[in-house]
């Protein structure tokens, strides 16, 4: 998932007090079950040490009028399964459960564990040693937080409705009963039936053409965790970009998207040159409607992205580099639990910067890195010095896994790897990473396992570095380390801003060749507009409140709000919040409004815009407004 170059402010604040009320569920365990080793996952009821699944086959009908998925999920169990299979569910309606073998089918008993406000309920299924396949008939309900149903009137052409899923972190359980933890992998296949005239796509092998019957079949032959299950149904088509890459998008966006993502094949080849062969076959991108709550989601073989990345000048395509990098760090090697989310995102953010440097040069990549470093420093400064949420390895037992999102996992994780690179040299560190990706492919990783591999293959007997590693991973805050980034471009921006503030002339700002990153740094550099001069002058000169670049526009509107100009720019703020559904943008601006005492404006806009927001975004904003 993409951690934007803007601070994902407010997320930790929103979720910090959202602790689960997890109750002990009394389940029968079978001590004679298989010997597979799994980390304890505080966010899953599943017990893979008792019984685990090898393959999921999903047969689903997409019922747009009823806004539900009516499905049959068939699970092939791994050999040595025990007396029961325990899956995660939340808000699903389970109709029946059967056991199958090659010759017969029998009905079996099932029960639910106690309900938890965040984790949902355990689905406990009685097994029979003669029946290695479990089949569940179920349907989703209105409580499916993973599902975004969009009326046709809200789409570009207004011809067809739209559906997409967002399974990370623990939302797969709201649309499929699954072992919903990142340390539990399985292959899957699917048969998806949709209304005629619509396309369906999944995180699997995809067709590039519409099937006139509305029946689509998918295969994912590599084992993946449940949070990488993804489905989209709507009016979209495909255009190739390179031999292994392409883009799906709605008719009004498909050509723009292809042009914007022109370097996608180059990114893929660059990533392969850095850390080894791309393992998944194809790498395609699907541009979702604006209500998609994130910048991107690294669903294997088919990344989901926000349309806000299409700025017209390819200035925001580092998002694609990030999601592509996840094909190695996250999808290929996955954090075993959400306690070690940095193993996904820290590695990926580091990998992203290496791709960007290889393609566009060190100066360009360093600007991205500096913005992320600034975000990290701000997050740490605003946290208590002993805040456990500023550790890389967290203990989220009894807490919402969404707490793992944010600058610590992304930027502190990246900075840790950058420290190792600068200490040991790029050539040696790259050899280490290649060996890491090769040795642990299609496996789960935790902090202690990584520390052991790091010690044996890079650090060896360097006791000083061994102590430093413990501090980086297990201690709150930010260790003393300043990365060797190039600041020339940003220093020039700061000089121009200072000249503008002295002369009051916007001609001092030579912005005609500014990158997005320079604009963001300029906005961050601006002081408080106490004399009500800066906002009006810069907006008149550069039309920042109407920028076609969503990153710049969001950063500027946040500055406007923080300087007490929310009422004057109400129409711009309202239009942005009604048109954009990316949660990072929404949290940034709703937080700024509430902090500036503009709660009434925030509530009015939210009531108008919420119908176009994803359930995950709605939940976050409601939490925020309730605390204001």
Image: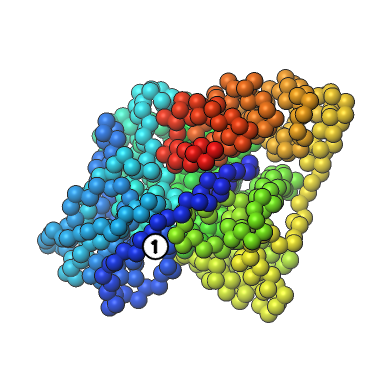
Q: Residue at 60% of width from left, 40% of height from top? A: 317
Residue 622 coordinates in the image, percent (x, y): 47, 38
Q: Is residue 478 above or below residue 586?
A: below
Answer yes or no: is residue 328 visible. no
Q: In the image, what residue occupies the spot 65% across and 56% down?
A: 384
Residue displayed at 41% across by 59% down: 43
Screen quadrant of the C terminus: top right
Query: Is 54 or 277 nearer to us in this picture?
Result: 54
- Name the residue that disc number 1 marks: 184
For the residue pair 92 and 150, the one nearer the viewer reads as 92
- Residue 268 is situated, as x and y percent measured from the top left of the image, at 56, 49
Q: Specify few, some or many for label 1: CA neighbours under 10 Å numbering under 14, 14-19, or 20 or more.
A: many
Displayed quadrant of residue 102: bottom left
Task: Name the spot of residue 424 as percent of width and height, x first.
Answer: 72, 67
Please indicate whether residue 182 sits to the left or right of residue 138 in the image.
right
Element at label 1:
loop
């Amino acid at each position: 998932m993409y951690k934007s170059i803007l601070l994902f402010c407010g997320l930790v604040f929103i979720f910090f007090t959202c602790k689960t009320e997890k109750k002990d569920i009394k389940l029968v365990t079978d001590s004679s079950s298989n010997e597979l080793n799994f980390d304890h996952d505080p966010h899953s009821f599943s017990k893979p040490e008792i019984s685990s699944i090898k393959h999921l086959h999903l047969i689903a009908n997409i019922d747009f009028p009823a806004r539900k998925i009516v499905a049959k999920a068939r699970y092939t169990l791994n050999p040595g399964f025990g007396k029961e299979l325990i899956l995660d569910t939340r808000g699903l309606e389970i109709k029946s459960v059967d056991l199958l073998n090659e010759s017969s089918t029998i009905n079996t008993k099932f029960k639910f564990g106690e309900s938890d406000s965040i984790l949902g309920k355990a689905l406990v299924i009685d097994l029979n040693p003669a029946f290695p396949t479990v089949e569940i008939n179920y349907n989703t309900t209105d409580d499916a937080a993973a599902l975004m149903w969009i009326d046709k009137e809200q789409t570009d052409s207004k011809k067809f409705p739209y559906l997409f899923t967002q399974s990370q972190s623990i939302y797969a359980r709201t649309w499929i009963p699954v072992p919903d933890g990142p340390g539990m992998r399985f292959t899957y296949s699917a048969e998806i039936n949709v209304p005629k005239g619509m396309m369906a796509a999944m995180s699997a092998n995809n067709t590039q053409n519409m099937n006139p019957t509305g029946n689509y079949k998918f295969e994912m032959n590599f084992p993946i965790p449940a949070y990488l299950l993804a489905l989209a149904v709507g009016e979209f088509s495909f255009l190739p970009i390179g031999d292994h890459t392409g883009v799906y998008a709605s008719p009004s966006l498909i050509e723009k998207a292809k042009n914007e993502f022109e370097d996608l094949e180059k990114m893929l080849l660059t990533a392969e040159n850095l850390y080894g062969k791309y393992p998944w076959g194809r790498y395609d991108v699907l541009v979702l409607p604006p209500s998609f709550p994130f910048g991107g989601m690294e669903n294997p073989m088919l990344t989901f992205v926000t349309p806000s990345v299409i700025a017209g000048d390819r200035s925001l395509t580092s998002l694609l580099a990030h999601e592509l990098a996840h094909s190695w760090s996250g999808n290929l090697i996955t954090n075993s639990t959400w306690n070690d989310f940095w193993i996904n995102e820290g590695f990926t953010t580091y990998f992203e910067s290496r791709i960007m440097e290889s393609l566009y040069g060190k100066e360009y990549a360093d600007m991205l890195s500096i913005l992320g470093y600034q975000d990290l420093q701000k997050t740490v400064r605003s946290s208590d010095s002993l805040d456990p949420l500023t550790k890389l390895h967290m203990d989220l037992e009894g807490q919402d896994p969404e707490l793992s999102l944010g600058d610590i996992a992304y930027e502190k994780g990246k900075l840790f790897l950058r420290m190792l690179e600068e200490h040991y040299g790029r050539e040696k560190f790259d050899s280490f990473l290649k060996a890491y990706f090769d040795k642990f492919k299609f496996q789960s990783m935790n902090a202690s396992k990584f520390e052991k591999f790091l010690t044996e293959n890079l650090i060896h007997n360097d006791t000083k570095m061994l102590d430093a590693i413990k501090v980086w991973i297990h201690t709150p805050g930010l260790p003393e380390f300043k990365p060797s980034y190039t600041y020339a471009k940003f220093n020039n921006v700061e000089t121009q801003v200072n000249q503008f503030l002295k002369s009051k002339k916007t001609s001092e700002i030579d912005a005609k060749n500014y990158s997005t990153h320079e604009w963001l740094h300029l906005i961050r550099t601006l002081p408080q507009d106490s004399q009500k001069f800066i906002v009006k002058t810069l907006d008149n000169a550069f039309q920042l409140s109407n920028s076609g670049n969503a990153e710049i526009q969001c950063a500027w509107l946040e500055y406007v709000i923080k300087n007490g100009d929310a009422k004057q720019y109400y129409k711009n703020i309202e239009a942005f919040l009604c048109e954009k559904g990316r949660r990072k943008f929404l949290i940034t601006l709703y937080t700024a409004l509430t902090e500036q005492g503009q709660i009434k404006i925030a509530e009015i806009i939210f009531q108008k815009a919420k119908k176009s927001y994803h359930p995950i975004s709605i939940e976050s904003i409601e939490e925020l407004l309730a605390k204001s």
